[in-house]
Structures are given as C-alpha cells and as structure tokens.
Amino acid sequence: MTIEKSVTICPSGGFCFGVKRAVEIAETTAKTNKNKQCRTLGPIVHNKKVSERLEREGVKIVIEPEEMSSGILIIRSHGASPDVIARAKKQGLEIVDATCPFVKRIHGIAVKLSEEGIPVIIVGKYDHPEVQGILGYASGERYVVNSDSDIMNLKGLKKAGVVAQTTKTKEDFLRIAGYLLDAIPECHVYNTICSETLKRQKDAAALASVSDVIIAVGGRHSSNTSRLFEIVKKFCPKSYFIEELAELKKDWFENSKKVGIVYGASTPLEDVLEIKSVVEDILEISRIPLI
Amino acid sequence: MTIEKSVTICPSGGFCFGVKRAVEIAETTAKTNKNKQCRTLGPIVHNKKVSERLEREGVKIVIEPEEMSSGILIIRSHGASPDVIARAKKQGLEIVDATCPFVKRIHGIAVKLSEEGIPVIIVGKYDHPEVQGILGYASGERYVVNSDSDIMNLKGLKKAGVVAQTTKTKEDFLRIAGYLLDAIPECHVYNTICSETLKRQKDAAALASVSDVIIAVGGRHSSNTSRLFEIVKKFCPKSYFIEELAELKKDWFENSKKVGIVYGASTPLEDVLEIKSVVEDILEISRIPLI
C-alpha cells in the first residue's frame, strides 16, 4: 500500500473569538476616532503582520498608560489589571475594553472569591498578561501555580478558589487541580480554559497522532501556541515550532509523507497557507491549480 | 535475626468523637427523663453490646418515628433527613439531636448549595443513613456517587457542589472528585471526610504494611470498618473482617509473627482487648501478668 503524501492544516486554529473581536474593536475604534490617538496596551495579538497592519490603520502599541497624555487606550483580549486601568484614567485617557469575555468571566470569579474572603489560585504562567490581569482582580490572598512543585507554597490553606488561564492545557489543569483537592479541604474549582482552546488541543492531538512531522506556527511569545506545541510533541516526536516561513528547514521532512500544521490563536490563516504551499513543494506534491 | 511475635492494636480506632458524644447524649437523656420513653432512630452504633447496654438503661431502638406515640426521639450521630424529623414532630415527639457535628456541617453545605441552585453530589453509599440524611437537606438537584461508573449519570452538569460521606476513604474521594472536575466546569469540592477517619485510615495502612495478618473488628453494617478493611487488604493480603471473637479462626495465624488489629468507629476497646488476648494465646506469646 502506498501512503499518499499530504499536508494537513489543523481544522481548528488561527485567531480565536477573543482575538478576532479585539482586532475588530481596535480597527473600529481607530476608524471612528480619527482625531484621537488610539493605542493598545501591549500588542493586541502576538503577530507582527497584524501589529503592522493595525499600525498602518493608526493603532500603535504602548506598554504603560503613562506613555500617552490623551486619547484612547484599548485593552486587548488578555485583559488588564484594574490598577492599570485606574492609572490610564488618571492620565485622562478614554478606555475601550476589548478584553475577551472568557477572560472577563475569570475577573468576575476572582472578584467574587475575594469578596467572600476565599484565596484565589490561578493555574497559569505568572508573567502572562492574562494572569497578571486576573491577579489584579483578586484583591485578597492570591497565588499563581504553573507546575506541580508550585503547590508546595500553598501549605495550610483551608479553602481556595481555583481558576485556569484560558489557554492552559486541560491535562495540566486537571492534574494540578487534583493535587489542590488533596491539599485544600474546600476547593472551588472553575475550569476556565476556553472552549476554543479545548477544541484546538483535541484537534492538534488527533492530527499529531497521524502525522510524521508537525509544524506549529505562532509567535514566540504566544502562550497558546506553546501549549499546542507541548501537546503535538507527545504524539509526534518530529514536531517543530516556527514563528515564520523563513525558519522552515527542508531536512525536517526527509522520508516523511504526512505533515500536519497546527497554529495558535494569534496566527493568521494566510501565513499558514503560505507554509502549507512551501511544504507541499518540499514533499513534491503536485497541486491542481485553482482556475 | 529472630522476629519477635507481637499483636499490635492500631493506635487510632474505636468509638469516634461523634459516636462517643451520641452515646453520652442518649445516656444522659435517659437518666434525666426517666418518666418518658427514650428511643434512638436506628441503632446509635453498629455494636450489639452497646445497643444492649443502652436498652438496659432504657434507650430502645425504633426504625420509624411512627412507632412512638410520645416521648423523646434521639437522632444518632449519622443524622437524619429533615422530613423524618418533621414526621417525628408531627407525632408529637420531642427531638434530641445527637448528630455528629462533622455530619451537621455537611447538612449546612447541602442547604447552602441548594439555596444557590447548585446541584449536590454526595460521594458515598446511597443507602447509608448518613447519606440519606444529607440527601434530605439537598432540596434541589442531587446525586449520590459511590464508584467511577456512577459518574456516567451526571452528564451535562454545568456546576456542582461535591461533599463526601465522613467515612469515605480519601483515595476513593480524590479519584472520584478528579473525574468530576473533568466532567463539570464549575465544581465546588468540600472534602468532608472527618479528620478522625483520615487518621484511622493512615494508621491502619501503616500497621497493615508491617503485619503478616490483620484482623479488622467491627459491625457487619459498619461503613467505616468496611473502609478500613479495604485499606488493610491492600497492604496485607491476610486480612480478615470479624464482628466478634467467635469468628476468629486459629489457622489464619499459621506461620505468622506480626498480627495487627484495626477497629472501626463503633467497636468498643474491650472487645478488641479480648481479641488481642486470644490471638496472643494462639501465637503462644507469653504475657507478663499485671500485678
């Protein structure tokens, strides 16, 4: 039996609901406020091309609200801490909130838990902007746990509320939450991994398990592409993480027939299609031209 | 090296706090109400001798409140459902509540969860009186889960509060709670296994792991002795469950040197000491008489 050569793009990937929404909000804000400075607090997505396009449309990036003296500050899908927003308001800036509703929901949970005096545990990466934002809403006792060993710092907690960074892998979250149940007698666990993330992780695992080579495409700083990469590596040892086409190496594909491409929430489909086309050339797959 | 023969009683065992308290309440109630009928709703402990002693002191057992036309109904440490208590009050009975405070706490959790519209999941044995009591306090959606397969019935729950029967093994509870975390996005987990139960389970496992034979002593219907028996069996294959001395078989101890005795929350120490003495005779351990 001859196995046909193929390059398959993972059926779920690319800009997620929250990112699409944030880009649209930024574009609309810029269009309808041509007389005002429009800035996003940090890059709206971890993607150079999109950042460059937004810049052409008038939306530049600031890292701190204090970099602006007037105009509109757009909060990206990751959200921001309430004290950062307070600082922006103090600067006299107008706020346009493009925080992903899934992240907004976690902010609400953190506020509710803190009001009830329940310590908040965020399962995620401490320095990720989403986690930093959530931390800001947890006004009482709060912790970030990213790995099993971090749990050692939580000794003696009698109760806790547990939330997940929206892009955490389900496997990691459930394992860590399981340890927390053992350590903390009253544990309010909110699985806040977003449904799109869950679907991507599932689809990526399925594709990796039938592929000889996997190319994971996404920004180096993209948390969700990193998680996807962790998953595909388990199912396909020949998995490679690239940010752009130029990084692709021909020798990765030697003796390979089935290539899969997975891509993160901040990767535009056009980049992926370009990579697909180049890999097809490397594999010498003949394409029927679209007329 | 000669291994010394020994019979060791597990350092924790016997009447737990809740059972001791319930027996004392029953005895005090009978003493101070000699002119009234005093009855417990079901046996106060799963132990014949104690039941017989209480009967001599005037405290008999009823199964339903309707068996009494007047007098005092004592609610045992397991607790009872509010509708059973309502039935007793309708009969004109006086209620003396000897429900274990650890169980009472679970009733409170079940009420709070139900008031908040959160379905209640009890990890425990459906027909155990403690579980039946808790179920009565869960006025909304409610489930009992005793094994992994029971989780199949919970499909589609968006949120749930999870409590444990106080005598559940920690291992079982954590495994089942872990499955629930995977199935239910918002899971409020209260580890309500009582601290004495946890200590007993730990001590029983430690003793079993260094014993050739384990004798588990307790009433056939005693849930907590059954759990202890499950634990010791894992660490010591030659483990036997007996209700009373007469069931002990000499050939269980052939070629054995280290014997351990574990006993449940409803087993009096006097029974255990008697068994210890007989096993010492079987092993031909010479005892220095106490002068």
Image (cartoon, coloured by chain):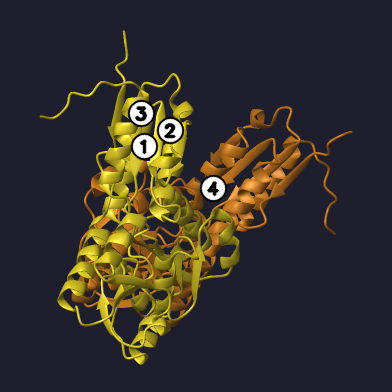
Chain colours: A orange, B yellow
**Which of the numbered marks, if any, corresponds to residue B259?**
3
Q: Amino acid at mark 4?
A: Leu
- Locate residue B237 relative to residue A176 in the image: left or right: right
Q: What residue sits right under mark 4 in the picture?
A: A228
Q: Are marks 1 and 2 in contact (CB under 8 Å)?
A: yes
**Other residues around mark 2 within 10 Å, as few (<14) / some (14–19) / many (≥20):** some
> Residues under labels 1 and 2: Cα distance?
7 Å
**Image spot of residue A287 (x, y percent):** 82, 47
Residue at 42 percent across and 51 percent down: it is B174
Count of all numbered marks drawn on residues in the image: 4
Position of the N terminus of chain A, as image quadrant, is: top right
Closest to the observer: A267 or A152? A152
Q: What residue sits right under mark 2 in the picture?
A: B235
Name the chain letter of the residue that bears numbered label 4: A
Q: Are marks 2 and 3 in contact (CB under 8 Å)?
A: no
**Which of the numbered marks, if any, corresponds to residue B205?**
1
